[in-house]
Image (cartoon, rainbow, N blue to C red):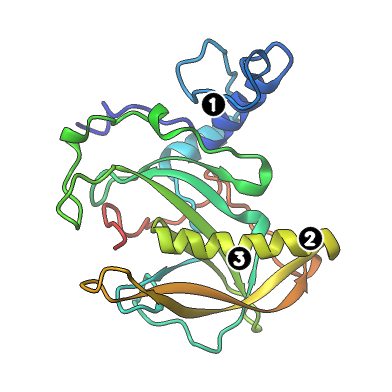
Amino acid sequence: MTASTRRKIPTVGQVLQRQKADHAPGGIAAQTNSNAVVPAAGTAVAVPDTRSLVERYLDEIAPASIVGRLIKFGKEARFVTDDDGEPVAENAEFTVLTDQTLVGWIKFNGEGVPPDRCQGLLYDGFTMPARDTMGDLDQSKWAEGLDKRPADPWQHQMCLVLQSTDESAQLFTFATSSKTGRRAVGNLLRHYNRVQKTDPGQYPVVKLQTGGFQHSDPRIGWVSTPMFTVIGRRSRDSAAKPDTSLSTDLNDAIPDFGKREP
């Protein structure tokens, strides 16, 4: 399937507008049980595209979601910067800009081709559409994954924005679509949510370390996992405020298209 014939995936702005329209008085969500899942597509609600010409252009040419340099948890069971493969220093400390956490679906389309995305800021009201609304449901057409089974082309991805606490104040994004990676981010965000109840306006400060567990299957053995060790807090007002919207990220290179985490 060529790029020109791929199904168009809504931008973050369009998804948020649709959700607002669905939950408005008389909207689809207001007419259904509050626990019901409202499909993200195929509704009769007309959603106006309020993006400017510049925003529409940038959404088309630069649909990336990486702030600063990309960090991944590599096969060697350590955090590495993706552009050079160098490990992150064990004593490095980062302020986690938790309210800039991006979540959603991503579909890779092969090397050199931008992925399809349906993502938004978790703490800005974005709700992930149900997987069965994203299409590509025929498993017989899925490509083979690392486990030799059909692999879902749509991956659940989380992107956590980090700011170095040293003088450089450099920005990074830890991106993951693995279960252990999402669990590590989720545990960190649970900690952040608890802190906000008693001490709002604070970001967690962490070190990037390696944890793990003994798998129940002895053939698999020890499984190394990413871990965010909280070592302190930092005032939100003293941290950077990057814009992680899809229309403002102008990274020329979008790394690792088509590569799937183990």
Indicate which disc, 1 or 3, sits on the residue closer to the N terminus: 1
Q: Which mark is residue 5?
A: none
Amino acid type of disc 3? Answer: Leu
Which residue is more in the foreground, 247 or 39? Answer: 39
**Are circles 1 and 2 on residues that touch, CB within 8 Å?**
no
Which residue is more in the foreground, 252 or 122? Answer: 122
SS at mark 1? loop
Would you call the spot at circle 3 few (<14 residues within 10 Å), some (14-19), or many (20 or more)? some
Q: In the rendered image, which residue does mark 3 sit on? A: 188
Expressed as whole percent of the image width and height from the top left, the position of residue 144 reads 16, 48
Expressed as whole percent of the image width and height from the top left, the position of residue 230 reads 64, 77
Residue 77 sits above or below residue 98 on the image:
below
Indicate which disc, 2 or 3, sits on the residue closer to the N terminus: 3
- Point out the image quarter for the N terminus: top left
Expressed as whole percent of the image width and height from the top left, the position of residue 116 reads 37, 39
SS at mark 3? helix
Mark nearer the viewer, 1 or 2: 1
Amino acid type of disc 1? Answer: Val
Residue at 57% across, 13% down: 45
Rounded to the nearest angstrom, the CA distance separating label 1 from label 2 is: 28 Å
Indicate which disc, 1 or 2, sits on the residue closer to the N terminus: 1
Expressed as whole percent of the image width and height from the top left, the position of residue 200 reads 83, 61
Rounded to the nearest angstrom, the CA distance separating label 2 from label 3 is: 13 Å
Residue 185 sits above or below residue 52 on the image:
below
Amino acid type of disc 2? Answer: Gln
- Point out the image quarter for the C terminus: bottom left
Q: Residue furthest bottom?
A: 91
Q: In the rendered image, which residue does mark 1 sit on? A: 37
Q: Which mark is residue 196?
A: 2
- Which of the 4 quarters of the picture holds residue 37? top right
